[in-house]
Amino acid sequence: MLIAIIFLLLFLKVGTSDWKNETLLYGINILLLVNLLVGFFSNLEGGLFSGMFHNDALLILEKNILNLGVYLVSLIAYPWLKKHEHVLEFYILLLTTLLGMFFMISSGNLLLFYLGLEMSTIPLAAIANFDLDKRKSSEAAMKMIISSAFSSALLLFGVSLIYGTTGSLVFTEITPLLNGSPLQLLAFILLLAGFSFKMSVVPFHLWTADVYEGAPVAVTAYLSVISKSAILFIFLQVLYVVFKPMTTEWYFMLFFLSLLTILLGNLFAMRQTNLKRFLAFSSIAQVGFILLGLSAGSKTGMASVIYFLLIYLFSNLAAFGVIGLVSAITGKESIDDFKGFYKTNPFLSWVLAIALFSLAGVPPTAGFFGKFFLIMAGAEKGNYVWVIFAALNMIISFYYYLKVVKAIFMDQNDHPIEKLTVPALPKLAFIICLSGMVLTGILSWIYEYIHTLSNF
């Protein structure tokens, strides 16, 4: 379905340029909705090409989560894209990255994983530069290319060492051949470093804030939610399946990386004045909590991570949607610009506030339940110092999230952002996100369904 949409857009681009942007955007969003709905039907489980590509119910769910995220990103990008001259190119590149993520998630072989990773990364660097008249956008793309090249080199080095010590690239064949030798441990450290770059784990996070700030808001939202979720989905498979015999070693690595990521993400988020940089460091801190859930190495750990990523998708895209709408119309992205925002734009203010509450983990939003399950999964190992540290950092995070809410609802501004007209497509995205932030936490069967699919 994705390949069909990509080819259709390519034919439209080559064939004619008479289409209006609004017409194109409504048509493409209909196609993305069809793609989302088709993802729930006629899926086959099994493997192809000697296990190089495989599919099961959990992987299908993960792909559908990404389809939902891409559809929402497309909806919130409408105010920006309707004024852009390269709409078709944007979607061709965007959907190519999504296709690469699908190959990566379904990979049962390290080579297919790497090909999917590159396919999902290189076009993403191109669309990070899609604010063509801004130097910051070009700078963001350059930093992303450099950091991606470096992380890919680390990954490839790790892959070569794994192949050298086991003689195989197939996930299921590697596992019984792992014995924890120093060379295999070095290989895993290199792989972990490569993954950490993609996930923005401290100390591999230095590219994140600059790229998030420079890229268009829609691309930043895609990076923070879709790209990160795809990497985490395959990271689950690599940790829980391929490197299962080395659980003790990677548990302690995740322990230290999680502590650093949560703490530094929170500390730097407090200092930010630009909302995109603010959400960049917020997303870094969120990854620290995800590493806590990952460390469980159990079915509960896998379910809690996937459940949290679903909630994070709704919360982060709602926040970026409001920021993107304001940025596309007014060009304003600073926290100070949003002072008194509630007086002129109550609907958008509530969307942003509820999204921030969910990211902070304030009940009854779904974000509270997501972080609760992550912390409970992390507690399975009995490392209560880590759990208490994470819980205390949740309290610290309230400060910087509520600082933005205070600016919106309580601070005075002589020249507040004018009343904005919310187009139909972004409004639909906001309604879906608001429903998701509430219902995903209240409807317990969602977590139970994910838990039953978890195949650890």
Image (spheres, grey):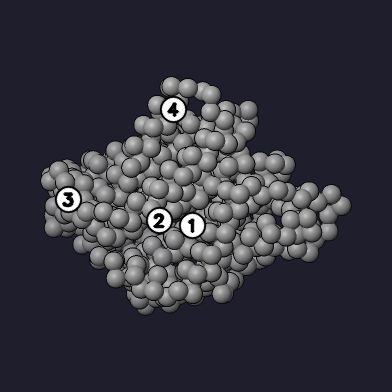
Q: Tell me which residue sits at (87%, 52%) in the image.
A: 414
User: Which is more toward the observer, 343 or 162?
Assistant: 343
At 52% from the left and 35% from the top, the residue drawn is 24
* Residue that numbered label 3 is attached to: 47
Q: Which residue is mark 4?
A: 12
Disc 2 packing (10 Å; few <14; some 14–19; many ≥20): many
Q: Nearer the viewer, residue 338 or 41?
A: 41
Q: Is disc 1 placed on a helix, strand or loop?
A: helix
Residue type, numbered disc 3: Gly
Mark 1: few/some/many CA within 10 Å (<14, 14-19, 20+): many
Label 2 vs label 4: CA separation?
A: 28 Å
Q: Earlier in the sequence, mark 2 or mark 4?
A: 4
Label 2: which residue?
Answer: 65
Residue type, numbered disc 1:
Leu
Residue located at (29% from left, 44% from top): 103
Among numbered discs 4 and 1, the one appearing first in the sequence: 4
